Amino acid sequence: MKNIMFIAPPAAGKGTQAELVVEKYGIPHISTGDILREISKEDSEIGKYVQETLASGKLVKDDITYQLVEDRLGKKDCKNGFIIDGFPRNIDQAYEYDKILKNLGYDIGHVIYINVDKKVLEKRITGRRICEDCNTIYNINDKDNSPEIESVCDNCGGKLYQRSDDNLEAFDTRYQMYMEKTEPIIKHYREQNVLVEIDGNDTVENIFKKIDKIINE
């Protein structure tokens, strides 16, 4: 089993694919957000710093994030592979991530770029509806994933809502930021011959089949 990094634009289904990989292979899904939230609960100097920084809406210093990521990846459950999520977010972090892996004696593994057309992403974003009770996610722009009644959850009858940032204006901003920060990362890993690009316009099941094939090559 190799280490896995997913690169994908907003609403590309990266989280869903990560869950499917975890379910099949039992490797840990390492999220920098989760690491920071966990450390913020600790009664320590770094815990208090992270807690205050997150509460203020600011970003934790890169040096601290790097150390926390290295500490987490160094744990026993990562020895047979892991999925890294939310990191690296820019090319400087990518260089540092490579150093962290080298320090731990790990290979970069698979860098899987899920490429999705912007128009497809727009439909996913604007059509997304979430149940306020059980958090089931639907999409009214996708007949295979739409609820029977547009505003009612099929599972529990709860009310469906649309996130405040699930609109075209907010999406355009997020997408532009993603492109600016991610293009250099894609180039960086392509030059190392570890990046595999797959078509993310397909169904969840077919995308997972492609990812599963890459993992098993």
Image (cartoon, rainbow, N blue to C red):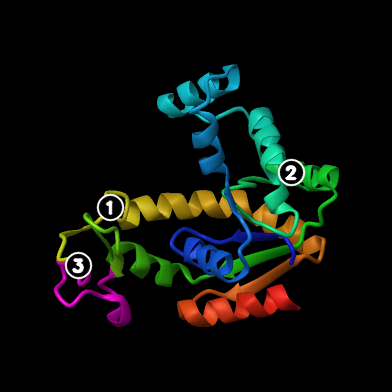
Q: CA distance from mark 1 to mark 2?
A: 36 Å
Q: In the rendered image, which residue does mark 2 sit on? A: 74
Give the label, 3 or 1, closer to the camera.
3
Report x, y in % for residue 141. 28, 74
Circle 1 SS class: loop
Give the mark nearest the N terminus, 3 or 1: 3
Give the mark nearest the N terminus, 2 or 3: 2
Q: Which mark is residue 153?
A: 3
Residue drawn 67% across the image and 80% down it: 213
Report x, y in % for residue 116. 51, 70
Residue drawn 64% across the image and 47% down it: 88
Q: Residues within 10 Å of mark 2 (few under 14, many from 20)?
A: some
Circle 3 SS class: loop
Residue drawn 54% across the image and 20% down it: 49
Name the kind of residue labelled 3 in the image.
Answer: Cys
Segment colored magenta: 139-155
Q: Main secondary structure of the magenta part?
A: loop
Q: In the rendered image, which residue does mark 1 sit on? A: 163
The quadrant in which the C terminus is found is: bottom right
Name the kind of residue labelled 1 in the image.
Answer: Arg
Residue drawn 55% across the image and 63% down it: 18
Report x, y in % for residue 26. 61, 64
Magenta stretch: residue 154 in it? Answer: yes
Q: Are marks 3 and 1 in contact (CB under 8 Å)?
A: no
Magenta stretch: residue 143 in it? Answer: yes
